[in-house]
Image (cartoon, rainbow, N blue to C red):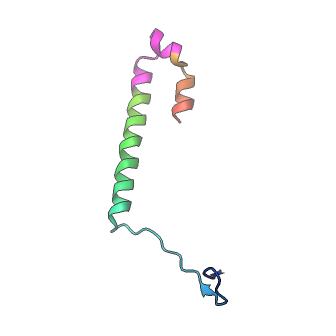
Amino acid sequence: EEWAPERSETCFPRIVVFLTWQEPVSLVLLAANTLLLVVVAGTAGLFAWHLDTPVVRSAGGRLCFLMLG
């Protein structure tokens, strides 16, 4: 739970910093995650809609849902 800088004989307590919801980085990560989840869900929906077509069957058929999951 402690660390020391190089060539130092003094130890300091470790400080753990978490992202808060007010930081722009966390909002960007949340937006990117949501966008990618929508894209994956849309792809799964599109594959389910066209499950019996040759393109979806050649891409793996029902196995595509496992890969998307």
Left or right of residue 45, residue 11 in this image: right
For the N terminus, the quadrant is bottom right
Q: With respect to residue 27, does 33 lie above or below?
A: above
Instruction: Name the spot of residue 61 as percent of width and height, x first.
Output: 53, 18
Question: Farthest residue in the front direction?
Answer: 7
Residue 50 lies in quadrant:
top left
Magenta extent: 46-58
Q: Residue at x 51, y 14 (%)?
A: 57
- Total marks shown come to 0
**Camera-side residue: 32 or 13?**
13
Instruction: Name the spot of residue 36 as percent of width and height, x first.
Output: 40, 41
Left or right of residue 46, residue 10 in this image: right
Q: Is residue 62 magenta?
A: no
Residue 20 lies in quadrant:
bottom left
Q: With respect to residue 20, does 14 lie above or below?
A: below
**Camera-side residue: 65 or 55?**
55
Q: Is residue 56 magenta?
A: yes
Instruction: Name the spot of residue 5 as percent of width and height, x first.
Output: 60, 81
Magenta segment, prevailing SS (helix, strand or loop): helix
Left or right of residue 47, residue 60 in this image: right
Q: Residue at x 34, y 51 (%)?
A: 31
Question: Farthest residue in the top direction?
Answer: 54
Q: With respect to residue 46, does 54 lie above or below?
A: above
Q: Residue at x 44, y 22 (%)?
A: 47
Instruction: Name the spot of residue 14 as percent of width and height, x first.
Output: 58, 80
